Image (cartoon, rainbow, N blue to C red):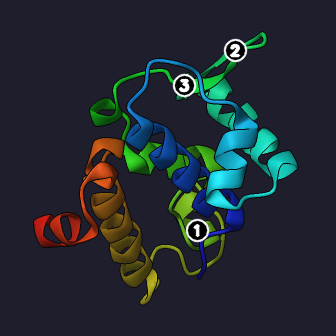
Amino acid sequence: MKLSSRGHYGLRALAHLAQKGSHQPVPLRQIAQSEQIPEAFLEQIFLDLRKAGIVKSIRGAKGGYKLASPPKDIIVGNIVRVLEGSFNIIDCLEDEDGNCCTKTEDCTTKIVWEKVRDSMAMVLDGMNLADLSKSGKGLIDSL
C-alpha cells in the first residue's frame, strides 16, 4: 500500500503554505519550484483542495493561494481524504451494506483491515498543518 503523488505533493505544498505563515497569497509557481513539484500537477491538486475549502485562490498580479483556515484547524487526515479518498484499503470496508463478497459476515481477515484503517485515521487525524511546521524531531516525539 502506497500513498500516491497526489497525497504526498498536496501535503507538502500545504505544509509549505503553513510554514510561510503569510496572509498574502503565494503563487503556485513559487510553491512548485520550492517543493520541486510539477506545476501542472500542482494545479490539479489545488483545484481539489480549493473545492474542499482547504485553500483559497486569489486572482490577479499578486494572486496565488493561501490557506482558508489557520494551520492548526486544518487536519492532515482531511487533506489526505480529499486527495486520496477514504482510508479503506479493501473494498468490503467501503461497502455500506456488506455486499462485497459472500464472506462478509464471517470474514476472518476483515478485522485486520479495519484496525489498519483505524490506525491510519488516528495518526493522520491527530496531526494538523501547524504540527508539520514544527521541527521533525519535535513532531516525532509528540506522536
Q: How far apart, in angstroms, are the residues tagged by discs 3 and 1?
A: 37 Å
Give me the residue at 46% from left, 48% from top. 15
CA neighbours of label 1 inside 10 A, class few (<14), some (14 to 19), many (20+): some
Of circles 3 and 2, which is in front?
A: 2
CA neighbours of label 2 inside 10 A, class few (<14), some (14 to 19), many (20+): few
Residue nearest the viewer, comparing 88 with 101:
88
Which kind of residue does numbered mark 1 sit on? Cys
Give me the residue at 46% from left, 74% from top. 105
- Disc ID at residue 71: none
- Circle 3: element type: strand
Q: In which quarter of the image is residue 128?
A: top left
| Looking at the image, residue 22 lies above or below residue 6 | above
- Circle 2: element type: loop
| Looking at the image, residue 28 lies above or below residue 93 | above
Q: Where is residue 142 in the image (x, y as percent from the top left)?
A: 12, 64
Q: In which quarter of the image is residue 22?
A: top left
What is the residue that sits farthest to the left in this orientation? 142
Q: Where is residue 85 in the image (x, y as percent from the top left)?
A: 61, 52
Which kind of residue does numbered mark 3 sit on? Lys
Residue nearest the viewer, comparing 13 with 88:
13
Quadrant for the N terminus, please: bottom right
Nearer-N-terminus badge (3/1): 3
Nearer-N-terminus badge (2/1): 2
Residues tagged 2 and 1 counted as in contact (Cβ below 8 A): no
| Looking at the image, residue 93 lies above or below residue 42 | below
- Disc ID at residue 66: 3
Residue nearest the viewer, comparing 4 with 26:
26
Q: Where is residue 126 in the image (x, y as percent from the top left)?
A: 25, 53
Of circles 3 and 1, which is in front?
A: 3
The residue indicated by pointer 1 is 92
The residue indicated by pointer 2 is 62
Judge left or right: residue 5 versus residue 53.
right
